[in-house]
Image (cartoon, rainbow, N blue to C red):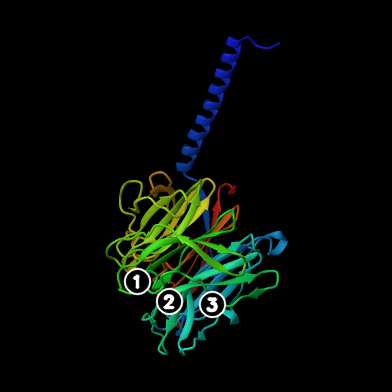
Amino acid sequence: MMPFPFDNFRYRCRSLIGVATLLMAQFAASALFAAEPLAFDVQTTVAHQELNPKYCWFHPRAAALPAFGKGGRPAVIVTIQKHLGTSDHYSGLCFLRTDDLGTTWTGPTEIPELAWYKDGAGEMISVCDVTPGWHAASGRMLAIGIKLRYDAAGKQLLDKPRSHECAYATYDPKSNAWSKWRMLEMPETETKFFLVAPGCVQWLVKPDGTILLPMYFKGQAGDDYSATVLHCRFDGETLKYIVHGDELAIQGGRGFAEPSLAHFRDKYYLTLRNDARGYVTTSDDGLKFAPYKPWTFDDGQDLGSYNTQAHWLVHSDGLFLSYTRRGANNDHIARNRAPLFLAQVDPETLRVMRSTEKVLIPERGVMLGNFGAAAITPEESWVTDSEFLVADKPHPRGADGSTWVAKVRWSRPRR
């Protein structure tokens, strides 16, 4: 029996009210949950330890290779290289590997395809500040960093276009094969993009397999660096520039550098390094960004992170930042770059929730801060760093050349 028109009207009203109530409840729960602290524990382990008076291991960053480890678990590759006697003088790329989620490790292993090489002018070419990541559509791990030119003494050369440019290589876990370094072709390399540096950045793979790659750049004039995000195609072999987003700039402090990008609940978050302090901004598409703001705690105090990189960990129920900062009884450490912290970020206010802050990697007398952060399993994310110690004996405060893996274990799995 069909309802009378009035009954039908009342029925529709009740239905609409019910749907609206449900949507409002879901929205309220989501908003509350986003700012609600997500508990986590930290297990800090050592993947490698070495003391050497000629070098230390530097820039360890991890990528999980799904189902390539034991028992269907991911294998984890940590790219790493030697920091030699001269500032920012790096070896070719090496890697550590674990097939049992860090219980045992092999390496560091040199990668012949990614060693130093001489170009046609006889200059030494290397690649540094590498971040690896898994590209599911191609079944490859993609490693992205900065190409550098060195003279015979290990000094960086910056006098020509593309002295810094985006270098990338791939690893095929099925064939255990590495490619050689290739360079991303960029527009305006004689002017705007004279130097291009996608170094120490966190980049993202979109659902369609294209890549959002943060980087910093500057022209020949020697002005401050600006930051932007490149949208690129990747077919498993070749990385191609499509377009770049807003050009983010700030006066002084060498500008913006080492941007890292995260995606959380339909929004993109970008953290930016400056000599004086760190900054943060957001975007709906990963290319056009809102005005940036300084990083602060939720009580309004400055975060105290400056002149070094910060990186993201993303959980389906929370957004987290890893960083170093002042105010941790660490003024004896250059740039206050130890210990290394992790804390949750309020995604609406873009403030760090002070009560959630935990030490990931301890301060033992030397710098940390050139690090990586990555999701490994639904239950676990890792932050990796190495102690900056070029010596043949431990530091009096305990540093011994450890390459650390801080395993962040979530109270509930990522979805």
Q: CA distance from mark 1 to mark 2?
A: 10 Å
Location of the N terminus by quadrant is top right
Foreground residue, 110 or 283? 283
The dot on residue 162 is 2
Which is in the foreground here, disc 2 or disc 3?
A: 2
Q: Find disc 3 in the rendering and name its residue.
A: 93
Residue 37 location, x and y as percent?
47, 44
Q: Secondary structure at mark 3?
A: loop
Say which amino acid is labelled 3.
Leu
Q: Earlier in the sequence, mark 2 or mark 3?
A: 3
For the point 51% across and 71% down, which residue is it? Answer: 184
Say which amino acid is labelled 2.
Arg
Q: How many marks?
A: 3
- Left or right: 102 in relation to 221: right
For the point 55% across and 23% down, which residue is it? Answer: 16
Which is in the foreground here, disc 3 or disc 1?
A: 1
Foreground residue, 219 or 203? 219
The dot on residue 219 is 1
Check the image and report above or below for 252 versus 268: below
